[in-house]
Amino acid sequence: MSDSYLAVFVDAHVLPESIEAFRAASLANAAASLREPGCVRFDVVQEAADPTRFVLIEVYRGQEGASAHKQTAHYQTWRDTVAPMMAEPRTSKSYATVTPAATWTFDERV
């Protein structure tokens, strides 16, 4: 698994009145995170059947990248901003990627 990345899936259940604010804060955090040298990918997805549920899909070059992410001002701003928006505490799980990174495609227009 030496050529794998660290993928972190963060589950967030937000209050209905906070959906748009959570989305905006999370997209700002994702955009800033993609400028970190240890961050490979950062997606924000929203459940179709229940729009109060989100998953942040974060991919780092390793544990060092994930740890460095939590030290950034943009992450700390996001964390503090979204805390009162939570319907329940957010959870996360970490995974090792299996699909070879060389096969990943990225849309350079983004």
Image (cartoon, rainbow, N blue to C red):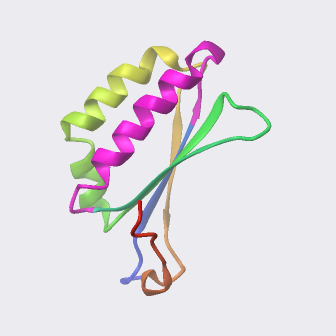
Residue at left offset 21%, top offset 51%: 68
**Magenta stretch holds residue 37:** yes
Q: Residue at x 53, y 37 (%)?
A: 91
Q: For the view shown, which residue lies furthest in the right direction?
A: 49
Residue 46 location (% of width, % of height): 63, 41
Relative to 15, residue 45 above or below: below
Q: Quadrant of residue 16?
A: top right
- Residue 91 against residue 100 in the figure, above or below: above
Predominant SS of the magenta segment: helix
Q: Looking at the image, which residue sits at the far front?
A: 109
Count the labels in the image.
Answer: 0
Give the image location of residue 104, x and y in percent. Answer: 48, 79
Q: Is residue 59 magenta?
A: no
For the N terminus, the quadrant is: bottom left
Above or below, comparing residue 8 to residue 89 in the picture: below
Name the image quarter holding the C terminus. bottom left
Residues drawn in magenta: 12-38
- Say which quarter of the image contains residue 72: top left
Residue 85 in the image: above or below residue 43: above
> In the shown orientation, is residue 77 left or right of residue 28?
left
Question: Taking 9 as reference, is 15 left or right?
Answer: right
| Residue shown at the point (45%, 72%) measured from the top left | 106
